[in-house]
């Protein structure tokens, strides 16, 4: 016998939400105060120089950055921090934090990731009393950890009971959302194009999330020198809308 509409509405059956769905929606919402919206990942300078001029260029750029940085570095760091938090292994969290922070070679981008990660931890700690998150925040306060965003997100998602692969999807979706949001503010694309890009990149995000959660921190890598060089050049410009 199939599940009735009333039972499904009450929380049972195939249409029911998973227990962590609302937490995932909250932490991935643009309303959540992490400050990530202040970064463009070098997109502002790329647009000014005519290197990325429309929706197709932006989609290709996001795909490249997912496959060469966000999926293979940030999401791997997130997954390992998540696992370490699950085992209450503070030393391992500190190690992942150090590895992730050192991989951010552009100072402005690294500083932005640290500010956003610390802000994320503070906000989640304000409504979630989790001992593992509290210990990580002690490490940040003591200078033993930086609070870099991918690690902070992994620890916070574990504190909220959000699944590890879903946490990686939050990381990836947030990256794409921030990029298309920056493109909108720059006047590069319009809103319908922004949603089209997000939809087009969903398979890439799913693949990156599924792949990253099984990797050890020693397998973390990234290679996007052109984007990083442009981020450094962007930092030296006088008039700009975004931090990076």
Image (spheres, grey):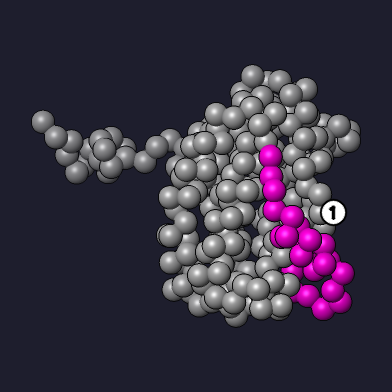
Q: Residue at x 63, y 69 (%)?
A: 182
Q: Residue at x 71, y 77 (%)?
A: 49
Q: Could you tell me how many numbered marks the image carries?
A: 1
- Secondary structure beneath disc 1? helix
Find residue 140 and report its image quarter. Answer: top right
- Judge whether 175 appears above or below 40 on screen: above
Is residue 228 covered in magenta?
yes
- Judge whether 211 appears above or below 123 on screen: above
The quadrant of the image that shows the C terminus is: bottom right
Is residue 159 shown to the viewer in this render?
no
Q: At which x and y percent is residue 27?
A: 57, 48
Is residue 28 covered in magenta?
no
- Taking depth in this image into account, of 46 and 240 the one nearest to the observer is 46
Q: Residue at x 31, y 40 (%)?
A: 16
Q: At which x and y percent is residue 28?
A: 55, 51
Is residue 228 shown to the viewer in this render?
yes
Q: Residue at x 82, y 78 (%)?
A: 239
State the residue position of label 1.
107
- Taking depth in this image into account, of 132 and 168 the one nearest to the observer is 168
Q: At which x and y percent is residue 167?
A: 55, 40
Which segment did they paint magenta?
221-244
Q: Image check: 115 left or right of 191?
A: right
Q: Residues within 10 Å of mark 1 (few under 14, many from 20)?
A: few
Q: At which x and y percent is residue 6?
A: 21, 42
């Amino acid at each position: 016998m199939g599940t009735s509409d009333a039972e499904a509405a009450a929380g049972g059956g195939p249409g029911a939400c998973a227990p962590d769905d609302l937490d995932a929606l909250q932490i991935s919402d643009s309303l959540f105060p992490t400050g990530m919206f202040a970064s463009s990942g070098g997109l502002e300078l790329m647009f000014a120089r005519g290197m990325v001029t429309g929706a197709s260029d932006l989609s290709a750029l996001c795909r490249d950055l997912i496959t060469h940085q966000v999926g293979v570095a940030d999401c791997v760091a997130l997954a390992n921090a998540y696992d370490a938090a699950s085992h209450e292994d503070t030393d391992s969290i500190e190690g992942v934090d150090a590895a992730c922070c050192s991989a951010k070679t552009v100072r402005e981008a690294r500083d932005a990731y640290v500010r956003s990660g610390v802000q994320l931890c503070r906000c989640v700690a304000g409504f979630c009393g989790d001992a593992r998150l509290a210990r990580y925040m002690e490490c940040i306060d003591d200078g033993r950890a930086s609070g870099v965003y991918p690690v902070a997100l992994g620890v916070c998602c574990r504190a909220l009971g959000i699944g590890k692969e879903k946490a990686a999807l939050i990381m990836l979706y947030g990256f794409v959302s921030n990029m298309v949001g920056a493109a909108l503010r720059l006047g590069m694309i319009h809103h319908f194009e922004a949603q089209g890009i997000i939809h087009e990149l969903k398979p890439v995000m799913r693949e990156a999330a599924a792949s990253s959660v099984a990797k050890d921190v020693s397998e973390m890598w990234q290679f996007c020198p052109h984007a990083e060089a442009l981020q450094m050049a962007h930092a030296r410009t006088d008039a700009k809308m975004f931090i990076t």
